[in-house]
Image (cartoon, rainbow, N blue to C red):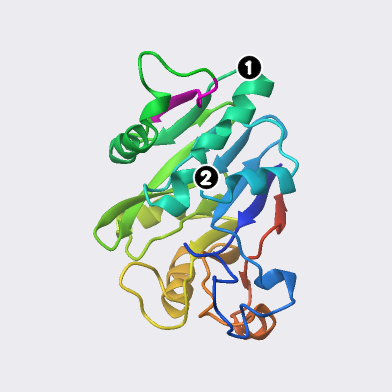
Amino acid sequence: MLKLTFLGTGTSQGVPMIGCLCPVCQSSDSRDKRLRSSAMIEDGTTRIIIDSGPDFRYQMLRAEVRDIDAILLTHQHTDHIIGLDDVRAFNYFCSKPIPIYTTELVGSVVRKNFDYAFGQHRYPGVPDINLCTIEEGPFRVGSMEITPIFGRHYRLPVTGFRVGGIGYLTDFNHIDDSELEKLRGLDIFVVNALRHQPHISHYSLPEAIELARKVGAKRTYFTHISHQLGLHSHEEPLLPPTMHLAYDTLTIEIP
């Protein structure tokens, strides 16, 4: 059985957004409180995290995570990688380095931003990170086979992932048909839906719905949601059947 947990479903500034007084940011509905996008997939043997943004520490505490097998990074933007420093806790309590799976491009940014973790004479207590380069084909983490899905975030390459019947894409606004074929037969499809209006580097909700129809998963969940999309209680009932707005802490199990 696979279990998917949405650790965060917000955009780069989260929801509520600092200084904003819109109805979404002022909402008392917990489903409108969105940390930066991240997800956890586990099968009882292996546990992986997708992306480690600035909320990574709190997300791990909230989900009561005490050990992880790997972190997969979708791309190098700050809201997806800057929490990597907090793997130090897993290093300390689990006495092991944490594998970080990235493309070569993203890995170079990680090495630059966290150069203190890769020096020859590392200060005691810095993150112990094992960078693993994602290639074209599937790779394994413990009991899981993971297939990378490649697309674009405006002009920036971005990587999604398929694990069994779960497909996870965030920060996409373009995907080739050849990559879409890797997503056939999904139980759960997760894709970003920033807002109703078009955006230069993210799928809008109408675009995400169109893509979801092409993929044809049994259920689709939208993530990386901004305050501009609207209240969860208003938007959720308007979605097509089998499609939903994800929210933080939502957990889905797949037999």
The span picked out in magenta is 125-132
List x then y, in percent, for residue 92.
64, 22
Q: Residues within 10 Å of mark 2 (few under 14, many from 20)?
A: many
List x then y, in percent, for residue 144.
57, 33
Of callouts 1 and 2, which one flags the residue occurring earlier in the amino acid sequence? 2
Name the secondary structure under disc 1: loop
Q: Nearer the viewer, residue 37 or 92?
A: 92
Q: Residues within 10 Å of mark 1 (few under 14, many from 20)?
A: few
Rendered residue at 43%/34% (across/down): 101
Residue 16 within the magenta-colored segment of the rendering = no
146 displayed left or right of 220 = left
List x then y, in percent, for residue 98.
53, 26
Depicted 249 relative to depicted 162: above or below: below
88 displayed left or right of 29 = left
Could you say which disc has been placed on residue 95 in the image? 1
Residue 128 within the magenta-colored segment of the rendering = yes
Residue 186, quarter of the rendered image: bottom right
From mark 1 to mark 2, how far is it between C-alphas?
20 Å
The residue identified by callout 2 is 52
Name the secondary structure under disc 2: loop
Residue 235, quarter of the rendered image: bottom right
Q: Nearer the viewer, residue 214 or 89?
A: 89
Q: Amino acid at mark 1?
A: Ser
Quadrant (top left, top right, bottom left, bottom right) of the N terminus: top right
Rendered residue at 73%/69% (across/down): 30
Q: Amino acid at mark 2?
A: Ser
Residue 69, quarter of the rendered image: top right
List x then y, in percent, for residue 215.
46, 63
Q: Nearer the viewer, residue 219 or 110?
A: 110
Rendered residue at 71%/44% (across/down): 61
Q: Nearer the viewer, residue 128 or 63?
A: 128
